[in-house]
Amino acid sequence: MKTTLRAVLSVALLIGFYGLTLGLVAVLIVLGLRGSAYLDIAGITVVRGFMLGGALLLLITVVFITGSVLLTRPSPPVGIRLEPEQAPELWQNVRHLAARVAAGEPDEIWLTDGAHATVTDSARLFGLIPGRRRVILGLPLLQRYTVDQLRAILAHELAHFSRWHSTTQVLALGGRTMVVEIARHTHVFPLRGLLTGYARLHVAVHQAVSREMECVADRFAVAAAGRPALVSALHELRLVDTGWAEYLTNHVNPAYEAGHLPADLFGGFAEYLAVCGEQVRRRSSDWALAESNWWDTHPSIGERIGALRFVPDVPVSADERPAIDLLPHPDAASRELQTRLFDNAGIQVLSWDQIGPLLDHRNAHALAQPLMQAAARIAGQESADLGLVLDLFGACRYAELADELTGGAEEGRLTALTVAFEGAVEAAAVDSGAAAWRHSWTGPGKLLTTDGESFPLGEIVELAADPDTVPAARERLAALGIRPSATAPTGAATA
């Protein structure tokens, strides 16, 4: 009852918000048109322009945001639309959950990338006129979830479209979106402050409605799959969300920019989590436990997990199968989805064991190139190689090289010279066939000798750091089979 009253008050505040904004528009227009009766001649034009301009901007903002919220419908996601005959067991589970939470049966199921398990509706008028309802599932999430965990998350999402959510509550949620967006997009300073204050009042009133809707949806999820399934699903959601972002940022995007794509994008993600899962879980903990933003309609995942302690568990039949088993042909779906996500024109498709070494070798050359250019300028030559750099080291010209590398900067000179020299040695080792990179998910690749031993980079750098031991560094390079002339003068990596 209390939640319903707050929902009614929230709708009333929405009506009041429009009354306030239109009233402000009217006041600004009147002041702008009648400004000459109250102002000095010198200020009439400026004040009129400010008043009328502010009224026009506010009116345009209200009309545009209102139209966008009322008329804009979510477009189909980038991914694969799964027909009932393509994934019959998945459709059966979704239909069963929709009936259980008293929601309309979805019209479409889409398979996408990322940590998604959501339901959208291309509805109009704050959801009062329903549209096409879509279930959107991220393949990386299916790789980690059990069937029980997937049921829990889907039951929660479908419950937001349940008939148990009253029309007033739906209107209140839509009104909140409208008020917040209008306040955010009002750029006239005095008006923005006034509307933001009103929006905060609206959010404060509606917050209980929003959180109660989330609690109701969580109770439906517990009834469908049990409390442990929902709690573990929320934990896995944060893991997949963080891990997928890191996987794309640290591995996939650099490879794609270099003209490469993995043959199995999603299989690579599974390998990444298998190796780095615990580190990713620790990094994702702060995000999950952080407090939600003032404007957020949802409590944070940490808050939701904490609240679930007070929700009675419901015994259910466990289904611990991997959720990916609900797809009859997951490998084919993975390959098709990958082609939808990336433009393969001019892209070389390789395994991660091939891509990783190529990128590491390219990076070594990129680090070495500025050092080669600096050495060539100091020696007055057109090009340089590792041999010339060692000649300059032997002549104790470290400071000159460092100045050329850093442009004479006082800080970071030694570090810049060391890093560039390390890249030059690594590039020469691989170009000479004396070492090879091994792909690593946890950081830069590992450089190994032909015997499979860790490459003694630190030893060589230490010997090269003293003019008296530079000859020993040359001998060590020769013993490893590294030709100082092997480093490409242009710094271009061979692929």
Image: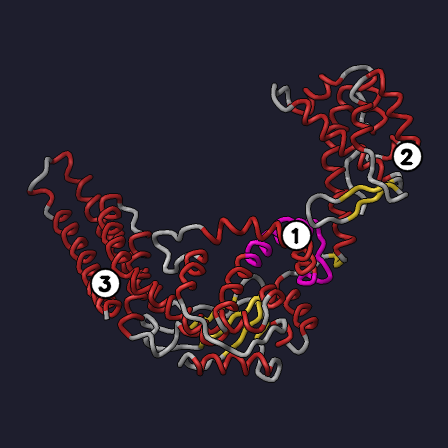
In the rendered view, tell whether residue 453 sits above or below residue 297: above
Residue 185: x, y in percent? Answer: 32, 52
Q: Amino acid at mark 3?
A: Leu
Numbered label attached to residue 276: 1
Query: Circle 3: is it few (<14), some (14-19), or many (20+) Cα within 10 Å?
Result: many
* Secondary structure mostly seen in the magenta stretch: helix
Q: Which residues are magenta?
A: 239-267
Q: Which residue is mark 3?
A: 14
Secondary element at tag 2: loop
Secondary element at tag 1: helix
Residue 206: x, y in percent? Answer: 28, 61
Residue 339: x, y in percent? Answer: 66, 66
Which badge, 2 or 1, is on the more N-terminal residue? 1
Q: Amino acid at mark 2?
A: Leu
Q: For the N terminus, which image quadrant?
A: bottom left
In the rendered view, tell whether residue 163 sits above or below residue 117: below
